[in-house]
Amino acid sequence: MAPLAAETIAATPAQTQPLQPLKLALWQAGEEWLFIADVSSQLPTSAEQKLLANIARALHTSPLAALELIEWPLPGAGVAPCEDPFGHEFLSVLFDARFQSRLTQKVVWLASRDEIDLAAVIGPQAVASMAGLVQLQVPSLPRLLADPALKARCWERLRPHVLPRQSG
């Protein structure tokens, strides 16, 4: 009987993993642009959202849509399932569905560091769902507000991908 109890205890960690919370903010700007930020530590302030709306305006796109929040594990879950402890499969399905139903052509990751490994954050399958799309990393909104010099670097990254404004 004792070996069975040991097996049960050993099996418990395999069934669940410690909570690996992730919150992603998504903003669609027209059909073409999608902005993504990891907001796990803090939701964007009104000043940060205003800055992003101004960036979208400079891109000659439709007004910025309301923030969409994606959370992992799903709200109300105390633990992440063992099969997908970081939410990578969940995010892959979500992004696959999103890119099949919309005409998004450009994905902009608002990064908290100069370069981040997107596959480590959202999983290689979710990154693969973005194949064929322009993928850019620019400084996060808090970084852009804190250091105005970063705004110029951000614009240098985005400007080559801006379509000319159509005259009506």
Image: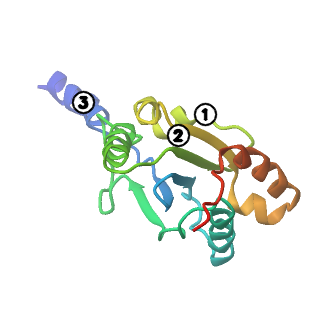
Residue 162 x %, y %: 66, 50
Q: Mark 1 or mark 3, which is nearer to you?
A: 1
Tell me which amino acid carries mark 1: Asp
- Amino acid tagged 2: Val
25 and 99: which is toward the camera: 99
Q: Label 3: few (<14), some or many (≥20) within 10 Å?
A: few
On residue 117, the disc is 1
Q: CA distance from mark 1 to mark 2?
A: 7 Å
Tell me if 35 is positioned left or right of 9 in this view. Answer: right
Which mark's residue is nearer the viewer, 2 or 3? 2
Colouring mode (rainbow / by chain / secondary structure / one colour): rainbow
Nearer to us in this view, 55 or 141? 55
Taking the spot 46% from the left edge, 36% from the top edge, the residue there is: 130
In the image, farthest residue toward the left: 1
Query: Along the horizontal axis of the image, is 46 left or right of 34?
Result: right
In contact (CB < 8 Å): disc 1 and disc 2: yes
Q: In this figure, which residue is indicated by the disc labeled 3?
A: 11
Q: Residue at x 40, y 34 (%)?
A: 129
Q: Please name the amino acid that badge 3 sits on.
A: Ala
For label 2, the residue is 121
For the residues bearing labels 1 and 3, Cβ distance under 8 angstroms: no
